Amino acid sequence: MLTLSTALLSFAPHTFTTPTIEIAPDVHLPLVGIGTWQYNESVTEAAVLSALGMGYEHVDTAAGYANAAGVARALEKSGRARASYFITSKIPGGLNESAAAAALDANLAELRLTHVDLMLVHFPATWGGEGGKAARQAEWRALEAFAKAGKARAIGVSHYCRRHVEDVLEIATIKPAVNQVQFHVGMGAAGPSATDDRAWLRQQGITYQSNPNPNPNSNSNPTPPLTLSLSLPLSLTLTLPLPLPLPGITYQSFSPLCGPCGQAAHAVCRTYAAHGSNPR
């Protein structure tokens, strides 16, 4: 077993290769990367530049993080070849087709790249809950056009419930490569009431991509170091400051922050929202 926080530091720059999973034809997603949520531009630049110097191969950002310029500067200063790193970005949900197309091009320009490796719709509606099936389908058409123009190697969604994914699949000519959701050891164990539909996503050939939430203020929880062991092609132990479940609540293995479904939300989603979580 390796402890990631120490193992990464033991490698000389650019000498290790991150395990990957194929999410689309010839598109291999590195299973370890650096996230940039809640970083301003200067912190983003410093963090990403340091990570790239240690050999990280995946950077996750989003238009909503407002730090793309910091990512861009770090990529340029690193001297790394474009093929040596994988960039995931996201645009807001709830956009019509033309607004989504504009947001995609604007984000790419901010990153100073000719393409990203993975582009996601960040949420199945606006942060305020406005949107619906037609909006999800319109936005997906914009993502498909973006990919077909060579500006994204793969496209996907984030924080989508099953019915949101089904809305997309109904009209898709390119299947979502991933559904990225918040899912980590601090959320408790899965049970019979789990609503994340991981098995169903697997049946559709959509990768269930989890992200931790190492935010010390998230859910007003303390963040002592917790260890997460992943059963991958190799044994890997991640030691990270992950949040504990809220007192008295055991989270199931579900996709929290799933957006408005146009009907009564899942009880677990209502519980999660009631405790002050912020959409990502």
Image (cartoon, grey):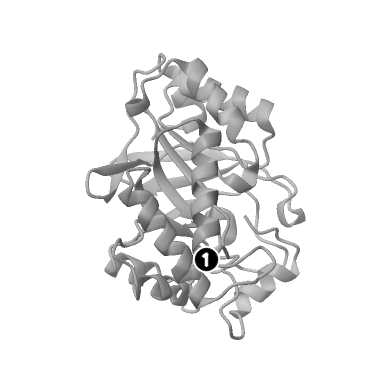
Q: Is residue 163 above or below residue 123?
A: below
Q: Residue at x 49, y 71 (%)?
A: 161
- Residue at the farthest bottom position: 263
Residue closer to the observer: 157 or 9: 157
Residue closer to the observer: 212 or 91: 91
- Coordinates of residue 201 in the picture (x, y in percent): 35, 67
Q: Can residue 55 be spotted in the picture?
A: yes
Q: Name the quadrant of the C terminus.
A: bottom right
Give the SS element for disc 1: loop
Q: Residue at x 58, y 70 (%)?
A: 259
- Residue at the farthest left position: 25
Q: Give residue 172's quadrant in the image.
A: bottom left
Q: Residue at x 34, y 23 (%)?
A: 16
What amino acid is labelled 1 in the image?
A: Ser
Q: Can residue 214 be spotted in the picture?
A: no
- Which residue is the site of mark 1? 255
